[in-house]
């Protein structure tokens, strides 16, 4: 039957009857037909392309007849809970409770453009606009209520969206928000005069209401990107070399035998230049077609290989930038009581989302709908428009949550590939990357070489610190665009997140003489690079905090005490004290309790962050000196991220950061030879599992009077430093390179 | 060649037309439109596609549909009634105790791996009602989580174990909320 009477996709009604996957109908002119959004689409949103005027209340929220509100948020939910936190802020200002507020998925025809969901900044960057919009809406609603109730605004009180005039017990009259404006537009610009609530009046912000996505995520009702279907669609798969080739040097199709998949009914090969894909009515047929297609590739052998990559980067002609210079490092080091230096290396690491990225695209001559898991719907719209030769307003991008992305995984690449396939097929296409596509064609967190030297005086005060870092920048062009259109490879321009990070590299300590130098390695003929959760910070901290511990060791001072002597900033001191106290830290210099036992234990403390906030961590681990196996037993992590809107979410984030850091420090490295990446699945790119998962102790420093800063990645660098220092404490040996795999550990112990 | 194949999923018999070598996962996702089992690796390495086949956790991404003919397949969607039948409860709860305890512990981050986590934990508790922490870690070791939610998942399984024990002792009036936090893993 297959091939003549396709069973998939089911008619829409059939799908809904079976209570299963979501099917979406769409039109550039009409309203989205979406079983979830339809309930919210009381106003004809979706009819026009965004971005929308950020100074209009209607851009940000709608009040419905049933006295509930929809808040339009420009940040994506990635499982971090920030959507709920932003709703807390909106509900707080509107005097609604959490059951009265909801949001919708990102959609370039519906939601505002707040920029991408990057750098753990959803709360920091998102909350001012949402807080202001909610306050403006409340003010407008009070003015309407004042007219309706015939009472001045000053005499009105609001609770759960009910505006009341009159005293308790006495005569009172009330009207609801829903009755005042229910499902009508405000048509009001911001006045700039609406007062926001003082912190002392907060009822919701700073508390921990539960996340609203969790019940559906455990019941199976939650619609992930991978569940979405389009009417009339075919299933697609891409065909590429197994494991990416050098960035900028590409891969060329040498031979392709379309007949090799003739035995799979309905399967078609689609090709544009060196971009190759297959589509079929049934998903398994697309998988088989991609597997069975006979194709050979011409691949230049220009990659350095994972073993030689560090030496090659270090030897490159780099463009150098002094990130920070203070005092005279060379002079301060001369004659200092204690001097430490080292050469450290951190590998390429993969985002490796648990479910590989996917996308759906329906491209016609008049416009395109693309559904994907991008961190930035508007940016993705612009690149898609360029690839499809359509004006941006004719491209509609909708966000559906996939699995956790931890930065720039293949979500744009897969969206571009789906759009190209749909254009070639003349039909809607659902494209699912396979595991080897995602692992093999990721934009990895770049490899890094760090050289540190530092000096302390006889009193244990750090007097000089120099950090030189080598790595390439993020890759600016996706693989699909390169293969299909021959778009030349290029890199991002250097920004704060792509440079040696002063906050990780000595910035927490008061050091009079500092020099930080970023050596930008040209990224052509390396692997693709992009931001991976706490970008580069793990490498910085691994190098930097080991150097600090070496100074403490030489000075014979306890590692916690040594850091205290060199810190005056109350935020750094706060997280440092918190983790030391929680871990029951007992003072003694690092590596002062070495043992001849086969299995030795150590503990270490580390500080670090990403661009904002303050992270502290303590690690307790054991090293088997015969096998080289390292087990992290306990990790304590503390964050100071200003006002913690929902402390419980942040604890969950810290918990995840600690586990993921243990995974990255002990296990994770992208491997590659001269032609291709060779770590293509969970066996060749292992991550931490249940049996080796440390106990974790997350802690949040609450600062109600300060602005919220990032909390999704800022403990990872601290934990990376703590793990490295704990290894030194256990063995007396500094690890020059992570991950701390048995082979590397045995080699380091042998050399010592 | 495609043929008509009958499979029993969540206690209902479905007739599907597919190649016998089609992995069960694609049939569950596309023909039966189920959302529990989902694609993760297609290599039986991660656990996101797990289902119960005759009560045993099975990777549907590498299990040909022909291999489950005549067997009972239970997916995440069918877990509460599978549990009710096992425990001879008169009423099917809305959620399996493992699902409820994951909510109570707010264990989820992105949640994509939780299908497999829940299926595996349900299998574990059906065979070992009071597992030690080491037994939980060992039983769950084949299920990966990229977000690092392991500590809270362990706690949730311990909580579910308490819940299920009291369900047997007290009939169906077990209270989830009264279970103490088994804070061995995350304090």
Image (cartoon, coloured by chain):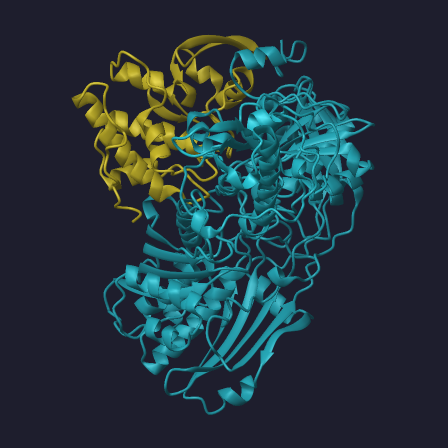
| Residue at the extreme bottom | A335
Q: Is residue A213 visible?
A: no
**x, y percent for residue A270:** 75, 29
Q: Residue at x 29, y 29 (%)?
A: B124
Q: Can you say which quadrant of the picture contains the N terminus of chain A?
A: top right
| Residue at the extreme left | B169
> Picture quarter containing residue A701?
bottom left
The total of numbered circles placed on residues is 0
Identify the colour of chain B in the image. Answer: yellow
Left-right relation of A189 to A138: right
Q: Is residue B86 above or below residue A273?
A: above
**x, y percent for residue A498:** 62, 61
Q: Residue at x 46, y 74 (%)?
A: A509
Q: Is residue A349 above or below residue A340?
A: above
**x, y percent for residue A635:** 34, 56
Which chain has been coloured cyan in this picture?
A
Q: Can you say which quadrant of the picture contains the C terminus of chain A?
A: bottom left
Residue in the foreground of this view, choosing between A558 and A580 = A580
Left-right relation of B74 to A222: left
**x, y percent for residue A361:** 70, 29
Residue in the foreground of this view, choosing between A452 and A595 = A452
> Picture quarter containing residue B56?
top left
Left-right relation of A691 to A94: left
Q: Is residue A123 visible?
A: yes
Left-right relation of A384 to A744: right
């Amino acid at each position: 039957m297959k091939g003549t009477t396709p069973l998939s996709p089911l008619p829409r009604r059939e799908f809904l009857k079976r209570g299963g996957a979501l099917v979406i109908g769409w039109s550039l002119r009409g309203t989205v037909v979406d079983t979830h959004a339809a309930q919210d689409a009381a106003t004809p949103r979706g009819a026009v392309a965004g971005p929308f005027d950020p100074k209009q209340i209607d851009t940000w929220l709608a009040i419905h007849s049933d006295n509930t509100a929809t808040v339009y948020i420009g940040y994506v939910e990635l499982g971090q809970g920030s959507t709920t936190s932003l709703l807390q802020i909106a509900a707080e200002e509107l005097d609604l409770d959490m059951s009265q507020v909801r949001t919708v998925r990102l959609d370039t025809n519906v939601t505002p453009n707040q920029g991408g969901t990057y750098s753990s900044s959803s709360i920091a960057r998102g909350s001012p606009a949402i807080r202001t919009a909610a306050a403006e809406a409340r003010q407008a609603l009070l003015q309407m209520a004042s007219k309706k109730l015939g009472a001045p605004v000053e005499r009105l009180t609001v609770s759960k969206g009910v505006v009341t005039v009159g005293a308790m017990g006495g005569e009172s009259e009330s009207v609801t928000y829903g009755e005042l404006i229910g499902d009508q537009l405000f048509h009001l610009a911001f006045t700039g005069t609406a007062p926001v609530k003082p912190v002392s009046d907060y009822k919701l912000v700073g508390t921990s209401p539960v996340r609203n996505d969790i019940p559906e995520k455990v019941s199976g009702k939650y619609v992930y990107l991978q569940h979405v279907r389009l009417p009339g669609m075919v299933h697609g798969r891409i065909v590429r070399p197994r494991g990416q080739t050098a960035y900028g040097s590409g891969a060329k199709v040498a031979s392709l035998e379309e007949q090799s998949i003739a035995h799979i009914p309905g399967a078609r090969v689609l090709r544009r230049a060196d971009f190759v894909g297959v589509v079929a009515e049934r998903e398994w047929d697309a998988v088989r077609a991609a597997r069975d297609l006979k194709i050979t590739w011409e691949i230049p052998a220009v990659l350095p290989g994972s073993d030689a990559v560090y030496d090659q980067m270090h030897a490159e002609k780099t463009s150098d930038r002094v990130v920070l210079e203070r005092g005279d490092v060379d002079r301060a080091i001369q004659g200092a009581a204690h001097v430490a230096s080292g050469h450290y290396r951190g590998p390429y690491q993969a985002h490796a989302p648990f479910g590989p990225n996917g996308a759906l695209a329906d491209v016609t001559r008049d416009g395109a709908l693309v559904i994907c898991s991008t961190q930035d719907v508007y940016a993705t719209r612009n690149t898609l428009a360029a690839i499809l030769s359509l004006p941006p307003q004719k491209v509609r991008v909708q966000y559906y949550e996939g699995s956790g992305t931890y930065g720039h995984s293949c979500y744009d690449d897969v969206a571009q590939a789906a759009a190209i396939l749909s254009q070639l097929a003349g039909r809607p296409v659902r494209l699912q990357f396979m595991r080897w596509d995602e692992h093999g064609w990721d934009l990895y967190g770049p490899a890094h070489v760090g050289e540190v030297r530092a000096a302390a005086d006889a009193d244990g005060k750090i007097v000089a610190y120099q950090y030189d870092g080598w790595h390439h920048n993020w890759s600016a062009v996706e693989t699909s665009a390169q293969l299909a259109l021959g778009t030349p490879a290029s890199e991002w321009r250097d920004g704060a997140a792509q440079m040696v990070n002063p906050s990780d590299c000595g910035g927490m300590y008061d050091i009079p003489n500092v020099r930080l130098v970023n050596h930008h390695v040209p990224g052509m003929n390396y692997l693709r690079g992009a931001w991976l959760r706490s970008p580069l910070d793990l490498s910085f901290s691994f190098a930097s905090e080991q150097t600090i511990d070496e100074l403490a060791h030489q000075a014979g001072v306890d590692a916690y005490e040594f850091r205290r002597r060199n810190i005056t900033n109350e935020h750094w001191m706060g997280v440092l004290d918190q983790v030391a106290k929680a871990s029951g830290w007992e003072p003694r210099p690092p590596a002062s309790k070495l043992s001849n036992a086969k299995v030795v234990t150590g503990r270490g403390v580390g500080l670090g962050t990403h661009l904002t906030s303050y992270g502290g961590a303590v690690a307790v681990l054991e090293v088997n000196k015969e096998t080289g196996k390292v087990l992290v037993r306990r990790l304590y992590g503390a964050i100071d991220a200003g006002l913690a809107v929902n402390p419980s979410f942040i604890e969950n984030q810290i918990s995840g950061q600690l586990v993921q850091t243990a995974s990255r420090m002990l296990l994770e490295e992208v491997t590659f030879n001269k032609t291709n990446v060779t770590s293509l699945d969970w066996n060749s790119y292992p991550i931490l599992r249940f049996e080796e998962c440390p106990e974790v102790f997350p802690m949040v420093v609450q600062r109600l009077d300060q602005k919220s800063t990032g909390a999704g990645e800022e403990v990872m660098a601290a934990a990376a430093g703590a793990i490295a220092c704990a290894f030194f404490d256990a063995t007396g040996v500094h690890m020059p390179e992570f991950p701390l795999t048995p082979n590397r550990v045995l080699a380091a112990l042998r050399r010592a | 060649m495609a043929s008509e194949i009958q499979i029993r999923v969540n206690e209902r018999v479905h007739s599907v037309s597919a190649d016998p070598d089609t992995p069960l996962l694609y049939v569950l996702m596309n023909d039966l439109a189920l959302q529990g089992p989902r694609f993760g690796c297609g290599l039986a390495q991660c656990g996101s596609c797990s289902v119960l086949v005759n009560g045993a956790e099975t990777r549907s991404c590498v299990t040909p549909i022909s291999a489950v003919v005549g067997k009972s397949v239970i997916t995440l969607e069918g877990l509460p009634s599978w549990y009710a039948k096992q425990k001879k409860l008169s009423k099917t709860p809305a959620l399996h105790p493992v699902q409820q305890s994951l909510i109570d512990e707010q264990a989820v981050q992105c949640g994509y791996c939780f299908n497999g986590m829940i299926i595996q934990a349900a299998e574990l508790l059906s065979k070992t009602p009071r597992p030690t922490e080491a037994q939980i870690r060992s039983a769950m070791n084949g299920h990966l989580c990229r977000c690092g939610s392991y500590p809270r998942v362990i706690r949730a399984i311990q909580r579910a174990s308490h819940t299920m024990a009291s369900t047997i002792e007290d009939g169906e009036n077990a209270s989830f909320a009264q279970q103490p936090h088994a804070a061995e893993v995350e304090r």
